Amino acid sequence: MIKKIILAAALASISNSFAQQGTASPYSYYGFGDKHFKGSNEIKSMGALAVFSDSLHINTLNPASYAKLQTTTFSMGASYKGNNLENQNGKEKTTSGSFDYLSLAFPAGDLTVVAGIMPYSFVGYNIQNTSINDKGMTEARQYIGEGGLNRTFLGLGYKINKNFSIGVDGAYIFGDTETSLTKFITDNGEGVALDRGTRYKYLNNYSGLTVNAGLNYEQPLNKNLTLFASATFSPEMKLKNDQEKIRNTVKLNSSGSLDEIDSSNEIAENEKMLLPMNYSIGVGIGNRFKWFVGAEYTSTQTSKYNSFYKYDNAHYNDYMKIGVGGFYIPKYNSIASYFEKITYRAGVNYENTGLVINNEEIKGLNANIGIGLPVPFSRTMMSNSNVNIGFEYGQRGNTNMGLIKENYYGINVGFSFSDVWFKRRKFN
């Protein structure tokens, strides 16, 4: 059964991953766009912690966690997000949705192999503003961006002993973005608007490899209490970027749309773009069959972006995130009540994105809750498969210095199916 589910989901999800608009954030203008969370939805509901791992869920944040899996496991997820944008001039609402991940794990003794695909980042914005240029003219600008990058990966997790495991995964990052800037003079200083302007369009094609290594450690403190610890590390890597720059002269026609009058283009191939070094450290405590609470610190050396991206009013410091979260299961093996077998999750995280615009740091706060529903829905049968539903609410940025504040909400759904594929038959 799981093989049929995987085939159908893979065909639908992978084709969809190349043609989706997963963000409507104006902050996706910067860098590679809005970085997509690379973990599963059940992990996201616990504050996005990589420290906890179990035998039922693929934790793609930490490849060392793969060694914990005991059966062939398939997981996939999708999400919907609403975003309320606000600045000093008004408010606007946007929505977006995305395929989040698809992964498959094959345990073989102490070694587990995991493969999958997920978005890496999204670009999706449409920003308009006016300003007075250095000649005293009123200039209107429109910034439009779309596209994104995808991440396909292959990972290995190895159990050194019952307490300690290590892992590594390699990923291929690829994708396309299209961004443009259109400029018009709406007042030449004498009350006259010009009917011609300039559009700069940038077509980017990215590709390259990344590596992520991790370790997990578990130490039983007594019969019902275990200490959990984890660490991950991704070294600095670079993506190849082939870019086409197009310059158009545009003219406003009688219907209010723009006609291209002439154009010129320039090709720049094999330019290198930075993927900065990243690491995380986490610790937690709990009973894996009952409850868990943990905390994690994540850092990314985004300050090195300053050598690659040049903005008039923006620069980067290093990225930082602190997350706290956990879960509670009333009675995982209950046969009297289905609701006692449900996993209840919650978590919060705070981040400093490292992006500084008009001397204002862009920071964010995110809260999540979620539930894990065992399947099949039977009061007497145990199941290693489950449906995970999560809800999030958060905010990013502020309205100081002409910036935009985001208040967003979302719902995400994840599926985790487990089955035994390679069990040797004892009887014919």
Image (tube, rainbow, N blue to C red):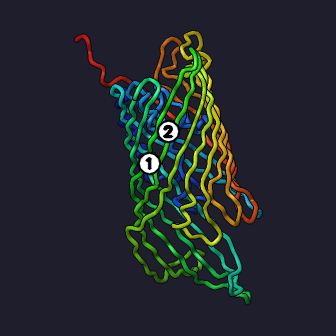
Callout 1 crowding tier (Cα within 10 Å): few <14, some 14–19, many ≥20: few
Residue plotted at (66% across, 39% down): 348
Q: In this view, does 51 lie to the left or right of 324?
A: left
Question: Looking at the picture, which amino acid does disc 2 mark?
Answer: Gly
Where the C terminus falls, by quadrant?
top left
Pointer 2 residue: 77
How far across and down, in percent of the image, does residue 395 sit? 69, 49
Q: How far apart are marks 1 and 2 (CA)?
A: 13 Å
Question: Looking at the picture, which amino acid does disc 1 mark?
Answer: Asn
Callout 2 crowding tier (Cα within 10 Å): few <14, some 14–19, many ≥20: many
Element assignment for label 2: strand
Residue 115, located in which quarter of the rendered image?
top left
Residue plotted at (55% across, 29% down): 228
How far across and down, in percent of the image, does residue 426 sit? 26, 12
Q: Is residue 277 above or below residue 382?
A: below
Q: In this view, does 417 lie above or below 350?
A: above
How far across and down, in percent of the image, does residue 236 sit? 46, 55
How far across and down, in percent of the image, does residue 60 sit? 47, 39
Q: Is residue 229 above or below residue 395?
A: above
Q: Which residue is the extreme one toward the bottom?
A: 190
Pointer 1 residue: 16
Q: In this view, does 167 lie above or below 131?
A: above
